[in-house]
Structure formats: structure tokens, C-alpha cells
Amino acid sequence: MLGTKNICMDNILSSNTNSGFLLTRQVKDTISGIQILLWLKTNTGVVKLEIENELVVFFIEQPFSDLVRKVLFDYNIHFVKLQPLRLKTFNQQPVTAIYFNAMHNFYRARQVLKQQGIKCYEDDIRPEDRFLMERHITADISFTSNTRQANGFSNLLANNANTPYQVIKQVKCKKPVSEEKISLSMLSIDIECSMQGELYSIGLYANNDSVEFKRVLMIGEAEKNSDNYIHWLADEKALLQRFIQDVSTFDADVFIGWNVINFDLLLLQKRCDYYQLKFAIGRDGSQPHWRKNTNNAEHYFIEIAGRVVLDGIDLLKTATYSFASFSLDNVARSLLGLSKKVEDADNRVKEITYNFNHNKPALAEYNLEDCRLVWLIFEKTQLLPFAKLRAQLTGLAIDRVGGSVAAFTNLYLPKLHRSGYIAPNMGDGDLNLVSPGGYVMDSVPGLYENVLVLDFKSLYPSIIRTFKIDPMGLIEGVKIQRTLQSSEQLSQALKSKIIEGFDGAYFSRTKHFLPDIIESLWLERDKAKCQNNAALSQAIKIIMNSFYGILGSTGCRFFDPRLSGSITKRSHELLKTTGAWISAEGYQVIYGDTDSIFVAVGAEKSAEHAQKIGKQLQDYINAKWQTELREVFNINSQLEIEFETHFTRFFMPTIRGINLVKGNKNIGTKKRYAGLVKDQLVFKGLESVRSDWTALSKDFQQALYKRIFNNEPVQDYIKDIVERLKRGQFDDKLIYQKKIRRKLADYVNTPPHIKAAIIANKELLRRDIDKRYDHRSTIQYIMTIDGIRPLEFNQSKLDYDFYVEKQLKPIADDILPFIDIDFDSLVGRQMDLF
């Protein structure tokens, strides 16, 4: 049995209902029709569901049915049936469904009909996704089969390393009544290689259920006293074969890594192709399926039968983490306080090659630590639970990057069909209207004491819930409005059947789904918060907050500016009105941004009194909106404003370049401020939190603001910093570091970091070394009396006047005028001495 492939063993006849977590989904044409393959992890092992004889469908408007039948006949395109339905488009046209039992016929029919000018609806939804969403299945699946079950084995190599899984056919699937907790196993993968892509080693690490697994596959002869986790292989081909064998033996559900798809796995695929090896890492012994990102030719997606690949960088971004750099070294330092085991993390290839040739145990240690760091980051940030929960909430594949539009479609489309509509196509929305972004008030610059921040909790989702904003609700609401004959009738209808939005939008009070979807997510998030489930809370927050962006995106089939405009324009109205109410209470509104209002309540207030005012304003505004919306719209307010932050000291700067010394202090910035909260400095949009300023500028801003907020003198501090800068005591803090976002040849204008990269590459070539700096690499550079120089090749003196003028002075000039100090007057004579 072990030497065969896909052997089937008859088991007992079973009609038990089981459940599992969806790992991967596939569809393929077979001789008998379309087959959907669903790989699940259950509490008893891995299961492969084979669903036979499925049909794929799209829709046309019924008046075109005869023409479509003729076109398909003329082009010899086989279809199963044309069936009129009791569904209609958003334009109230009845539709006909066209069913196919082969994907190639579906694709060809879609292409031909579009060429004939015949509109096809929902023709971009794949059959495996439609199969799941129409059953309201997301990631948890309940399945039943009355057929005999079989056990499948994938014979990957001649040494009979096999991966078992159960095959179930003629299966019925549905959404489970309750979710069963199913644990997924992970394996962290990292490769080390030369600049030319020749493999040196492959690291593997796992710590599932507190059982640690460590392995490094290394090319070379075994060395005495080397760690037993190093497995020595004769050459690159043997290395690849052993990796495939170990993947099968370990049998992980999830591969994790850092840029693991577009670097590690892609290079492994290329090296297997080079040696004509089958890159058989699928659970059934199949090779991965690769496809390019249509928007980025350098970015690939991978599909592995029965296994999931989660990239740490992509998943952190999806979970809304933000770092100055997403390099493994920087993220590990930021989250774990750990760093890579290499001297120069940004330019490490030279050291890796040196260690491969002269110190392979050191390379193995480095390789394994990279795997471990990725694992620790996943644990620290709960990335796997986050990905699982996101899949369970939305129906997105667990490895899907982004996918907000697809998530919305999964949740919304089945409900839409059950209400008698099919979805519109992308581009059907009115493109002539423009919806604005979030409202940002003009700020009142100044140095304040006791500033309160009141935030509308999840403002856009709250607006959707309150005003019943919904794609189908818009269609139904406008339909009702158009049947009215007089303004008196309209006024009555506003309170009984529809709610008025903006730009001619009206929304049905009863026929809608999105407000209810958000309400259910909202309740689940509140429950997650009570249970301290941070991953679930974050997943729900991201999904809810994405709905506005989806409705305002031309990449969404439900795009309509009347939808997004009715959200953002309502938010403008809410912030302006709320600000006016607060002003009427005698407090100064100094700034507002999207969902937040900043209120100065007076320097004479104690901290306790200021916080009491914040809670009073919170309760007053919430009650006020309940009354206002009931009287004007006859609706219950779902809006909730919270008193969130009390700044004991707060600074709102002016637009840079305004001469404050001459008394022009009225033009404030937006999205840039700093404050003191419980003795902790908070910076927004200022140099201290920006990656394109030097370490010295950040230290200077932190220390200067802290002194000013604590009413400490700053003159001597500023003079001391300038003097020490001129003496060379901060040279290690004058380094600029920036990532190269595009290929060097693509830059038309040449910014400083690109100039530094070009100089560095020329110097490397002069020394007969390969160029190091291009797309995605990071360059460090400094400003010298001879201009921009890459740090590693600099022999010029630093231009200290430049750093004073461009790094210290702008920061000081933002805040010093508010305490009547002029930076130039303070340090001018001192600068002349050097």
C-alpha cells in the first residue's frame, strides 16, 4: 500500500454528520463535469471533499434570451440550460440564468456574449465560491455523506513518505449549527541562498502544542560537534528532495514565513524546475498552482492542495499593523525586542555567503532563528487566530490578502438573491457624482492645557446602521420615492417608508441587509471585548470599517456615490453640528478629524474637573442626537460618542512657513499635533513618528516638547544640542534610512536616497562587487559638505549646518514662537563660532 498513489480503502458505510475548518478550495473540469474540491481539517484528521457534477452560472436580462441561445448555438458553445428566474436586476429587468457543466464553456460564452454587446451579470463568481456562499458557509463546514469513504495517500518520494487524508464523495455541505474548535498546525519556512538564487540551506521551525521542532537542511559534509538539528545534504538536488520529504512527514496545515510566497516558495519552485523535480508539497502529492497578480507582475499567488500559506508581512498589513519598515529585523525588534543573528540585517547576503563557505553552523543558527522569529511574531500578534476568524466571519479564503470587496460580496449576495435581486456589475454605479472624504475641521493652532478628545465610536458603520444605508435599500427607497406624486406625500413617506440621504438617495426603512450585518458584527465585537479576544475584536473592527470604503470603491459591484456620499456627507453634518453644540456650551472646539472632536475646556480646570466635563459632554451629545434624529427622521440613533482622551498639555502647530513672530498665528495644520496624556507623550503626523527624519530630530523633538509641556526652560537645552551636534557627538544619529520603492531606472526625478543608491552601486562595481541597491532594498545615507553620500562609502565631513537648518530648526520653529522664543536668535551667534 505504501508504494502506491491515491489508494482507496473501503471503510464502513457512514451517514454521520461531521465538521471541519476549510483549508483550501479548488475547481476543475472533469469528463463528467465540474468538480469542486474542498480540503478540511477536522478533529480526526484531514478530509478531502469531492463534490461532483456542479454547474457554473451567470445571468442575462430576459429580453436577450432568444438572442443568447442563437449566439451560443452559432459559436458551438455547449450549455446545460437557459432558465428564466423570478429575479431581477437593480434596473428592475427580469433575468435568465445560463448554466454550464464545463468551465471552458462558461469562459468562452462570457467572452462571446460580451463581444456581442450582451451584458452578463455575476459572471466573475467562481463555482466553488458560489457553492459556499449560497449555503452561508464561511470557513466552518458541516458535511454528511452516505457513500463509502476512502483513505487517500500521496506517495511523494521513492522512500514511501506518505501523507494520509480521507476522501469523501457525494457529500452534502451546510453551515454548522455551532462552531467546533479545530486546531491548525503551522510550520515556519525560510531559505538561504546566493545572490544568483542557488540554495544554501532551508530552515524549518514549529512549536505546536508546546512541542518544539527545529531543523535546518544544509548543503555540505557533516561537521563534528555541530548541532543535531542540522541535517547535512550532498547537493542542492538532495536538499530539495529532503525538503519535500520533510514537508510530507511533518504534514502541516499552514506554512508561514516572511515574504515566503514571492521569495522562498517561488525560488524553491524554480530550483525544482531546474532539476526537473516535482515540487510535490500538496497533500495529495500535487505541485502548487501559481498565478500572477494582474496589478503587479512581480507578485504571485500560490495554491497548494490541502495546505495554506500565510505571509507575515501581508497578514500584519491586513491586520492594520504599521511599521517604519516591514523587514523581519525591524518588526522583530519592534514587537519582540529581538533581532536577526547577523551583523548587518539590511545588507546580509555577503555575510550569509561567507558563513556558507566558512562557518556553516553559524549560517544554520541564523537560518533557524529567522524561522523562530516569524513564529514568535505570529504568536505575539495572534496572526493565525486573526486569519481564521476573518475567514469564519467573511467566507474569504484564510490566505486571502485584502479581499474586502470579496468579503462584502460573500456576506451580501446570498441575502440579495433571496430578496429577488441579482447583483450589478462593476461600473453600473453613477460615475458622475463624487463623494467627499472624511470631514477635517480647520484647526486653531496653539499651546493648550486641558484638551479633551471625543470620538464617535465606529462612525461610518454607525451611520449605516442609523440611516439604513444599503445597496438594495437604495434601489427600493428610490423606487418608492418615484411613485410619490407630491411633496406632501414625500414628507409622509419619509417618516413611514424611506429615509432621505444625499444626492437624491432614499433608503428603505425595512428592505435592507447591511445595517443588520453590521449590527450582528457589532454585537460579536462587544462579546469579543468582554472575553478579551483581541484577535476577534480586531478582525470584526476591520471588516466593519471596510464597508464604507467598499461602497465608495469603483472596484466593487455595488459602487454608487449616493451610498458613499450618504455616509461621508452625513458625517460632515454630524461633526459640524456636534461642534456647534459644544461651542454653545461655552467650550472651544479647536480641531476635528473624521470622527473626533478636540475641545479646549480651560487651563484653570483641574484634571479631575476636565475629565468630568468630558463625561458630561459625552452624555449630553448622545442624548441630543437621540432626540434630534427621532424628531427629524423618526429613527433611533445608533451613534455613540465617547470621551476618550484627556490631554493635560496639547499643541496644535501652524502650517510650516507662516511667520508667527509677526503675529500670524491663525492658520493651523491638519492631522499634525502632539500632547501629554498621563505623563506620556503622544505624537500624530510629526517628525517623531515619521521614518524619513533622523534619530537626532526625533530625540530632539521628544525632549523639547516634554520640557515645554512640563513648563521647564528650553534655551540651554537647545544651545547644548546644537553645540554637541557641531562637535560631532551625534554623528551616529544623523543617518537617513529609506527603502527604495521602485527600480532605480523608474525614477524620473532623483530624490536623495536614490542619489545615494546610485553612488553606492557605482562604488560597488568599481570594487568588482555586484550592485546591492535596487527595488525593495534599504539605503542609509548622510549629508556631507560634498553633498549626499551613502553611509558605507563616505569619506567626507558631515555638513552640520545642514542638519541644524533642516532637522532641528523646523521642529523648534513649530513650537517655540508659542512661548516667545526665536530659534535663530537663540543659536545664531553660536552657529557663527563653528
Image: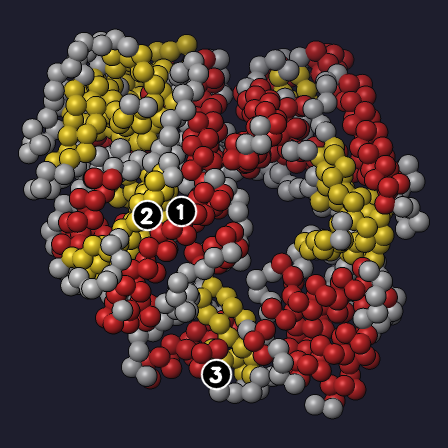
* Residue contact at pointers 1 and 2, CB within 8 angstroms: yes
- Tell me the amino acid under the disc marked 1: Trp
Which residue: 74% across, 39% down?
644
Q: Amino acid at mark 2?
A: Tyr
Q: 443 or 735, which lies in front?
A: 735
Query: Is any atom of residue 63 visible in this view?
Result: no
Near-viewer residue (440 or 361): 361
Query: Which of these two is toward me, 504 or 761?
Result: 761
User: In this orientation, which residue lies closer to the viewer: 204 or 228?
Assistant: 228
Residue that mark 2 sits on: 205
Q: Please give the residue where the numbered disc 3 appears in the rendered image.
A: 794
- Quadrant of the frame with the C terminus: bottom right
Q: Is residue 333 visible?
A: yes
Q: CA distance from mark 2 to mark 3?
A: 40 Å
Q: Residue at x 18, y 52 (%)?
A: 240
Earlier residue among tags 1 and 3: 1
Q: Residue furthest front?
A: 225
